[in-house]
Image (tube, helix red, strand yellow):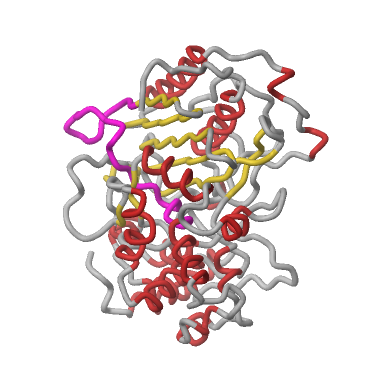
Amino acid sequence: MGAVHERGWLFRAAAAVLAVASGMMFGGCTVVPGPDPSEPALPTSTSPRSTSPTPPASTPATAPPSAIPTSTADRLPPIPAVELKAQLEQYSQRLINAGAPAVLLELRVGAEVWTHAAGVRNSAGEAARLTDPVHVGDITQPLVAVSVLKLAEEGRLSLDEPASTYLPELDSLLHQPEPYTVRRLLGHTSGMPDYYAALLASVAPRQALATRLSPTDKLALAAMLPWERRRAQTFSYSNSNYIALGLIVERLRGRPLADVLRADVGQPLGLDGTRMTADGPVPEDMVHGYARIDGEAVDATYAAVHIGSAATGLVSTVSDLNAFFDALLDGRLVRRERVAEMQGPVHAEYGLGLFQWNDRCTNGFYYGYVGDVPGYGTVAMASADGSRRLALAVAYPQRPFPEDPAVQGANGILAGMTQLAEDTLNGSCRLGGDVWFGQGP
């Protein structure tokens, strides 16, 4: 449906919101436990696995230093490239067998690349291709973080000033218990409620997907939920943080967010498959994702609720995602000191727009992001030097929408995807210097 001009339902939602004041339901990344036994099993790990669950959000798999081998490459034998390829293909086939419409993957190790595309892009049965765009959801956020940090580099914004300095209406709109800085929005430490829980409490699931909300509408929904009051600046994922950041970027640039992201990221890197969702027909080459509502399959592709969203609105390809994280970590989008801020301190849950996972090849970390929206899951992960990168996108087997709050975040497929990415990169450093996947870029 179009932008909401009638706000009556917004205020009627207040009573319903109280029932879900404790948290978010499937609006984006959530804390994810280990894979559910009913979902595709992870291929045999190619490296020692962390005992911590591997989340797309609040508990990255960081093991204590004593648990990390000092030299994984020396202790473990090389893995033939053919074996690694076979494991990835088997994992993809299990997802397809479980009902996933499509699986797309690109793995880069040094100058070599291996790609994989399986399934179909739409109900007409057209074969999915590696270049097909998918809805990458929350992976919108590191691009928005880049645009915020570019403003900081230009002196037009300070990360340690209250966000209301640049968006004065935040104070009256959100009823903040205290002023929150731009840095705390970037790092998901503001405690701001997630608007998505309020939306799902106020309308039926089909309407939630089909409702186009302005950023201000979304923040008004967030304001219906209580803020999490904390003494410490602890991590708590909320899409509302990046909705507010998107408004700040638009205000300071004087242009729509989609145009800013294109100028800051898309054009310099030649990311032709990356764009913000917008009004109009779904692109013909887009992979369609589906959700199950009231027992029926519903096409969640280009869902109106995500259109133009600074938190979840991005469409991209696995190749573009690998190119983005390579350029970001190489300091080609923002200065290296800003990249270090995005990465966060050692063993941090989250920096300023990036998650981290254990790199057992270097005793360092992988950096990247995970996207989780109705119909789609995406993982993009890269070594700190960018030499090993993996991007994996899946159009999910049909899942109930919304998720049962009693099992909130129980997305075993996404947890498996994240663990697969980490295990694959940890295994890839043992392929030897003459690795060749049998196909070029």
Give the side of residue 387 with respect to residue 303, left or right.
Answer: right
Give the side of residue 124 with respect to residue 75, left or right.
Answer: left
Q: Which residues are magenta?
A: 117-142
Which residue is more in the foreground, 143 or 332?
Answer: 332
What residue do we see at 47% from left, 60% from top?
146
Which residue is more in the foreground, 41 or 283?
Answer: 283
In the image, is residue 242 above or below residue 126?
below
Which residue is more in the foreground, 301 or 155?
Answer: 155
Q: Main secondary structure of the magenta part?
A: loop
Across and down, in percent, residue 343 comes to 61, 53
What residue do we see at 56% from left, 68% from top?
185
Quadrant housing the N terminus: bottom left
Whether residue 205 is visible: yes
- Which quadrant of the figure has residue 177? bottom right
In the image, is residue 325 above or below residue 190?
above
Across and down, in percent, residue 407 comes to 56, 46
In the image, is residue 68 above or below residue 43?
below
Which residue is more in the foreground, 116 or 243?
Answer: 116
Q: Is residue 140 magenta?
A: yes
Q: Is residue 232 magenta?
A: no
